[in-house]
Amino acid sequence: KKISDVLQKSAPKPGVPADLQNLLTQHFGENRSVIEIEELQLSDSCFLPANDLTHSFSSYLKEICPKWAKLRRSHKEKKSVVMLVLCSSALRSLELIKSMTAFKGDCRVLKLFAKHIKIKEQMNMLEKGVFHIGVGTPGRVKALVEQDALCLNSTKYMILDWNWRDQKLRRMVDIPEVLYKHLYILYSVYSLLLLVVLRSWSVKFSFC
């Protein structure tokens, strides 16, 4: 059955931490040992409450990040963002950027997608300026991380545009070409968490 056929007959359900954990286990299960799979399991404390489908994007961000103004003022590092928002396409990224106006306040938002924006341009912007929020697609974020143009150490919030569906009723994780790159970013963050969790650094995942 096509994913759109299945979804047409079922009511949308908000994403939960178990969805993400199961996705990683299924994808990496065949190539990882039991111990490595266990290491991919994060505690519930790494996840923020998911959007229950009643919030707008701005109101949801205000709820999960009430101290955003303080975080924004204290962020001074280049080549990094405090909040990273991952979604399925450039058009969806622009929609989210427009809809978060009431939340972001006086901060700089960087578009992290390939449409009409060259990667060199984004690399130069990250190197020379300080940005607070990055919104884009897993593919472009993956490329920037691989080239050391984007560092995830300062990222405190990773927002997954999990609940949104396109015209074919597909979520971000239902699109194969998006899913692979999406998993790469998640695995990179997971690996970073496992490496530096003892240094009191943490990133919070949430599903919008």
Image (cartoon, helix red, strand yellow):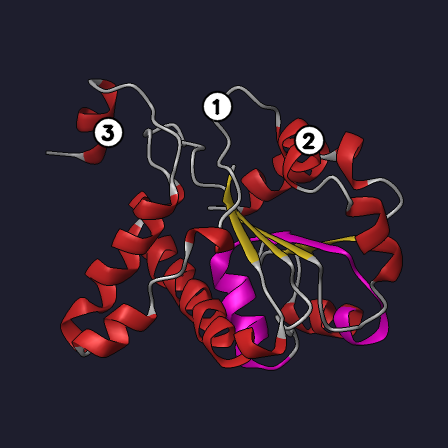
* Amino acid, disc 3: Ser
The residue lying toward the viewer, choosing from 24 and 88, is 24
Q: Do the residues labelled 3 and 2 touch (CB within 8 Å)?
A: no
Q: What residue type is labelled 1?
A: Leu
- Mark 2 surroundings within 10 Å by alpha-carbon count, few (fewer than 14), some (14 through 19), many (20 or more): some
Q: In the displayed structure, does residue 183 sit left or right of residue 200?
A: left
> The residue under label 2 is which amino acid type?
Ser
Sequence-first disc among 1 and 3 = 3
Q: Residues within 10 Å of mark 1 (few under 14, many from 20)?
A: some
Mark 3 closeness class: few <14, some 14–19, many ≥20 residues within 10 Å: some
Q: Which residue is drawn at 51% across and 75% down?
A: 192
Q: Earlier in the sequence, mark 1 or mark 2?
A: 1
Q: Distance between the residues labelled 3 and 2?
A: 28 Å
- Check if residue 93 falls in the magenta segment: no
The local secondary structure at tag 3 comes to helix
Figure check: 203 above or below 165: below
Using the image, tell me which numbered label, if any, was put on residue 4.
Answer: 3
Q: Does the magenta stretch include residue 133?
A: yes
Res 149 seen here: yes
Tell which of 169 and 28 is nearer to you: 28
Q: Write down the residue under mark 2.
A: 58
